[in-house]
Image (cartoon, rainbow, N blue to C red):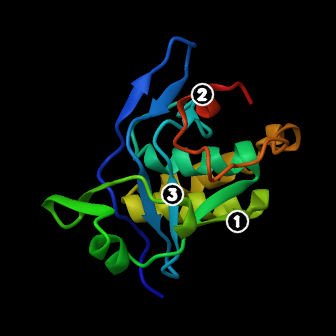
Amino acid sequence: MAKGRFLTQKALIRQLDEKGMYKVSENELYMDEDGTIYLVWRLFQTDNFTWINSSDWDIRCSHLHDVGCKYHQIVKVNLTETELYQRGLLIPLYEMENAYCKDIPAKYLEIINVSGHFINNLFYRMLKASGAPKVIQCLYRAGVSLNFNWFLTGKEKIDLNKIYDIEWNSEKG
C-alpha cells in the first residue's frame, strides 16, 4: 500500500467574524493510502480544532476530519491524480508536491457516508502523511475518539451542486 499524501499546497484559511471560526480559502485534496482522493472544498467553514486547539501540525488534517464530523459524509474525487492534471483541475505551482486545485465539477465527485471510526482513522492517516510525529498521531487519534459531539451532528448533508456556493457554506449547521 502506498503512503497517503496531500496533493495540494498547505492550507490557506481566512478568519471569520465568529470567534474561533475559519473559512478554507482554496480546495484541498488528500490522496489516501489506497489511492482514493478526497476533497475539502474552498469556502468550507471550520473551527480548525480537532482535539487540541493547535496549529502546530498540518491543519489540512483537521479540515477533512471536520467535514466528516459535520456531515457524516465526505467528498470523494472520481478522477486520478493524473486525470486531475490532464483536465487542468490540478495546477502545479513551484514543484509537483505543491499544487493548486480548481473547482472540480460535481460530475467527478461522489458523496461517501462515513462512520466516526472511519473519519477518525482517516484523520490518523492524514497526520501520518503530513509528517506529524508518531506521538502526536497517536495522541490526536485517541483524542478524536472522545468526540461525543458526533452524536449531535450529521443532520445536514453535503450538496455537491452547492459546495462552491457562498450562501450555502455560510449557513449555520
The percent position of residue 85, horizontal first and vertical second, equals 28, 71
- Tell me if mark 1 has few (under 14), some (14-19) or many (20+) residues whose alpha carbon lies within 10 angstroms of its own: some
Question: Element under label 2?
Answer: helix
Residue 50: image tag:
none
Residue position marked by numbered label 1 in the rendering: 112
The amino acid beneath tag 2 is: Glu
Q: Residue at x 45, y 42 (%)?
A: 42
Q: In this view, does 89 lie above or below 171?
A: below
In percent of width and height, residue 154 lies at 81, 45
- Quadrant in the picture for residue 149: top right
* Residue type at the position of mark 1: Ile
Quadrant hosting residue 96 = bottom left
> Which residue reaches farthest left?
94
**Secondary structure under the numbered disc 3 in the rendered image:** strand
1 or 104, which lies in front?
A: 104
Kindly state the secondary structure of the residue where label 1 is placed: strand
Residue at 59 percent across and 49 percent down: it is 140
Q: Do the residues labelled 2 and 1 touch (CB within 8 Å)?
A: no
